[in-house]
Image: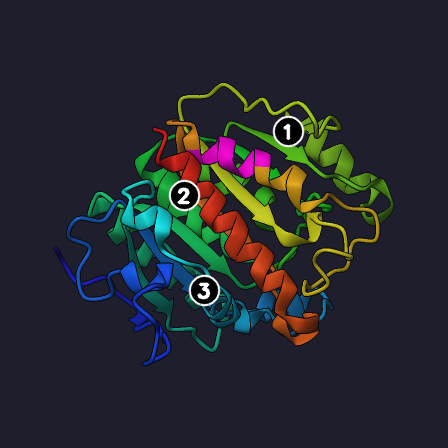
Amino acid sequence: MKTIPHLVPARWPADLSPARLAATFRTDSPEGCRIALLGIPDDRGVWMNNGRPGAARGPAAFREALCRYGAATCAAGELPRVFDAGDIEVSDTLEETHRRVTAATGALLDAGLFPIAIGGGHDLTYPFVRAVAARFPKPTGLYFDAHLDVRETMGSGMPFRRLIEDCGVRALHLHGFRPLVNSAAHLAWFQAHGGRIHPDRARVVLPKAKHLFVSFDLDVLDAAHAPGVSALNPAGWTVREAEAWVRACGANRTVRCFDLMELNPAHDETGRTARVAAHLFLSFLRGFAER
């Protein structure tokens, strides 16, 4: 395969036990793999929106947490093989970092891999999905977030507006919306452009579409479960609720990509949010294995 551009190798512990799931990940070649893991260690967009900095270390914290999980299911052939492509080499400007994310994601897709991104500010969903939309036209978006993220200006709060305006995204479906942390103007824009808010978290039903992208902002989770995020949520979802949705997304053949965003280890007590992110990643893989 062609070299994936704009990447630096992932850092895993030199003494990683072969009994750990992460030891089964390939870093040299994607041969035999179905999944590509892509770290995007950038939080410039969070800074621009006055959020809590620290999500640039999200991918590193995620990998550290993943090292704690055993490999029993993978050894039994129950999980798809993973190619860790590494981390995006972040630029001094947000626009250039976005360009690099799109280029690297596109190369992974062209290699026949299913991309899963770990961030990083939620603005990074925009360039990540931009590559997907170029290959799977007019996708529908399903995202889990306390915020609409349809701001007009650059920053972590704008990805879904840009995807509608620039990338031909047909519709947006949001779970986890909290009215008290969103403006009336942004809600009006979202609804005027066909966005739907789904209040029922218990009934796991994905939108019907030819192509779906799925984005999971960890701030949809209650702060008791996920304190390590850029914007705390005192009335969010439980991990159990999220797990059911994420696994269903993994099993759905119309889903073309998946991301976990806003992991912020600077505010993560005992690393438990990173553990939650790793758990949700594995839940998605368990669903993907059912395809």
Q: Quadrant of residue 137?
A: top left
Q: Can you identify the residue that label 2 sits on?
A: 285
Q: Quadrant of residue 194?
A: top right
Q: Amino acid at mark 3?
A: Ile
Q: In the image, which is nearer the foreground, mark 2 or mark 1?
A: 2
Q: Residue at x 51, y 61 (%)?
A: 119
First along the sequence among labels 1 and 3: 3
Disc 3: CA contacts within 10 A as few (<14), some (14-19) or many (>=20): many
Q: CA distance from mark 2 to mark 1?
A: 32 Å
Q: Quadrant of residue 180?
A: top right
Q: Is residue 184 left or right of residue 12?
A: right
Tell me which secondary structure the magenta stretch mostly adopts.
Answer: helix
Q: Amino acid at mark 2?
A: Leu
Q: Can you identify the residue that label 3 sits on?
A: 40
Q: Residue at x 19, y 66 (%)?
A: 28
**Label for residue 193?**
1
Q: Is residue 122 visible?
A: no
Which quarter of the rendering shows the C terminus?
top left
Q: Amino acid at mark 1?
A: His
First along the sequence among labels 2 and 3: 3
Question: What is the magenta range?
Answer: 244-250
Q: Is residue 62 visible?
A: yes
- SS assignment at label 2: helix
Q: Residue at x 54, y 22 (%)?
A: 207
Residue nearer the viewer, 158 or 179 = 179
Across and down, in percent, residue 270 comes to 66, 72
Residue at the far left: name it.
1
Across and down, in percent, residue 51 comes to 72, 67
Q: CA distance from mark 1 to mark 3?
A: 29 Å
Looking at the picture, does residue 16 appear above or below residue 259? below
Residue 206 covered by magenta stretch: no
